[in-house]
Image (cartoon, coloured by chain):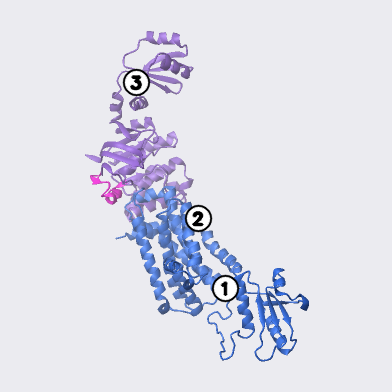
Chain colours: A purple, B blue
Amino acid sequence: MSIVKVEGLGISFGNLPALKEINLQVPAGGIYGIIGPDSAGKTTLLRTICTLLPYKEGKVEVLKLDALKDAAVIRAQIGYMPQRFSLYRDLSVEQNIRFSARLFGVNGKEYASTLERLYQFSKLQPFAGRQAGKLSGGMQQKLALSCALIHKPELLVLDEPTFGVDPVSRQDFWDILHALKAEGISIIVSTPYMDEAQQCDRISLLFKGKIIGSDTPAGILAGWKGHLYRLETDDPQRLYGYLKEDLRLGDLQLFGSDIHLGSEDALEDAVFEKWQKGCPALKSWQQIQPNMEDVFLKMMQ
Amino acid sequence: MPNLNRIRAIAGKEVYHILRDSRTLAIVILMPILQLIIFGYAMNMELQNVPLAISDLAHNHASRRIIQAFEQSGYFRIIPVAVEDFVPEELFRQRKAQATLSIPRDCGEERTQMLLKVDASDPNTAQLIQNYALGILGGGAKSGLLDLRPFILYNPDLKSSFFFVPGLIAMILVMICALLTSISISREKEMGTMEQILVSPVSALEILLGKVIPYILLGLLDAFLILGVGMLLFKVPFAGSFVVFLGFSFLYVLCALCLGLLVSTIAKTQQAAMMMALGITLLPTLLLSGYLFPIPSMPAVLQKITLIIPARYYLVIIRGIMLKGNSVAELYQAGLSLIVMTIVMLIVAVKRFKLRLI
């Protein structure tokens, strides 16, 4: 059963196309990642799923309801956490949660018990009276998540929730998402961090308004054909120039001070030794398993 | 049907904002008082100590009585001028006098003709000088068969504070109320917090009502503040009842707040909302409400436009209550006009309010 179904969705802002021919099936009960660089269209896609943007091309179904016609019904059953921190900085932690609760009609005993559970995972209780604007980035994200969860939504939509948050808080946040998933909540999350793709059950790679691949993270990685080598060097610019200009090799990516080289055929040591003579900057080489970033960069081409 | 709980949620949150934001609160309370004081002393239209040169050729009992009347009025200050220097045009040019009075030799006899010359480089002042002078001379219209004696009601001394304090209440209220709601909504759009509200099942009417309700109290607080300061500093009378004042001010405040809502459905940023709210309240209220210029003397087109200026109706109401002691029976028509405008603006605002981001 899919909790979100997008068919042939296209959205333009003026003459600027933001999304083109998007097809998406999000199965219920897992974590679905929308992975892509900045300005790929992640926010536009998530806002459309949350019924916040109108569209003319295609069809969007959320919880088997039409995102255009049944917006009000859908809104009551999903939790959404926008990319920008969009709670009230001058209101306290508890006032913010209380406000969300009242908007969704969560009151009395139900509110008290949900609040307690939210405090358990967010550890925000000691800060209940603090103004939201005075929380750290990680705590602000947990507060925003709490507000999105106060009405126990079936579907949770998170737009770059870990952006600009320190690595420890990021892992904290993912642990919470896994716990929510265990409770049966479906989650759609967007992120520009490739390493976070591994945390998802299924992912779609979004680039320039188009989905360039949808699968499980393992399936995406398995889609890599050929061999990948990591070349270590003390002068990456020079080696990159040598491989690109002199040898006319196409499948090259700079990774910090290393270069990742893709090849359809296996390469013998002799080949590298020959290159080393041509460009002494090449220090060592090693065959490696491709990671998500390698695959994504290759698919982008 | 609008959900009362959601309206209360938004209104309650707005109250927290107001209480937390001491700067806005200070503006809401201090701005009207400052404006009242500045306008009050700057817009003084009463004459005082107008320099007057008198040439008295009669030098008799009657002429001395006339001069004494001018001196004692307080409006004029008699400046001494030698007989050979009494050339009105020259005195005006040198700004030594603003008016001159020539009393002929036959003063005190039947049908004396006196000549009053007034410097009309400022026509408003000239008009006032003329009126005061004629008043002192015992009714200039007194001639032959007719004896016309003006008897002025409600403001017998023609004190300008009686005129500007009610007008200022009307102007400051519409300005501040339109600012409050328009900024409050455009701020949520600008800060991105509207996105969080929109993704809940809340309706446009619920959002707008939740935004208006807390500010009604602030608006009424301002109304009483300006009235109180006006009565204290400028000694304006209050002939009517406070309950009637409260009721009609409530209608006016509500109308102005809805005007702000309408602005917020057009303006995207706080800055734009502020400019727009000030633009459509300040000048139209000053010029087209009948505050500074009487509506019957406007061109027909402008007279039609005054029909959609809320202050036009409130001015009738507040002048009626403060000066004439009017009650609901005399004011209900103006009140109805305010109600109709409020409802129309609220409907348009709800229709225009977008429950989506674009």
The residue nearer to you, when weighing B4 against A22, is A22
Sequence-earlier tag: 2 or 1: 2
**Amino acid at dot 2:** Asp
Q: Could you say which disc has been placed on residue B161 in the image?
A: 1
Residue at the image position 45 percent from the left and 72 percent from the top: B246
Q: Could you say which disc has been placed on residue A289 in the image?
A: 3
Residue A198 location (% of width, % of height): 34, 30
Position of the N terminus of chain B by quadrant: bottom left
Residue A203 location (% of width, % of height): 30, 33
Host chain of mark 1: B
* Callouts 3 and 1 in the same chain: no
Residue at the image position 29 percent from the left and 51 percent from the top: A72
The residue nearer to you, when weighing B87 against A217, is B87
Q: CA distance from mark 3 to mark 1?
A: 87 Å
* Residue B11 visible within the image: no
Mark 1: few/some/many CA within 10 Å (<14, 14-19, 20+): many
Asked whether the beta carbons under mark 3 and mark 1 sit within 8 Å of each other, the answer is no
In this figure, which residue is indicated by the disc labeled 2?
A: B21
Q: CA distance from mark 2 to mark 1?
A: 33 Å
Magenta residues? A62-78
**Amino acid at dot 3:** Gln
Q: Quadrant of residue B3?
A: bottom left
Q: CA distance from mark 3 to mark 2?
A: 56 Å
Mark 3: few/some/many CA within 10 Å (<14, 14-19, 20+): few
The residue nearer to you, when weighing B87 against B18, is B87
Host chain of mark 2: B
Q: Quadrant of residue B152?
A: bottom right
Where A133 sits versus A164, above or below?
Answer: below
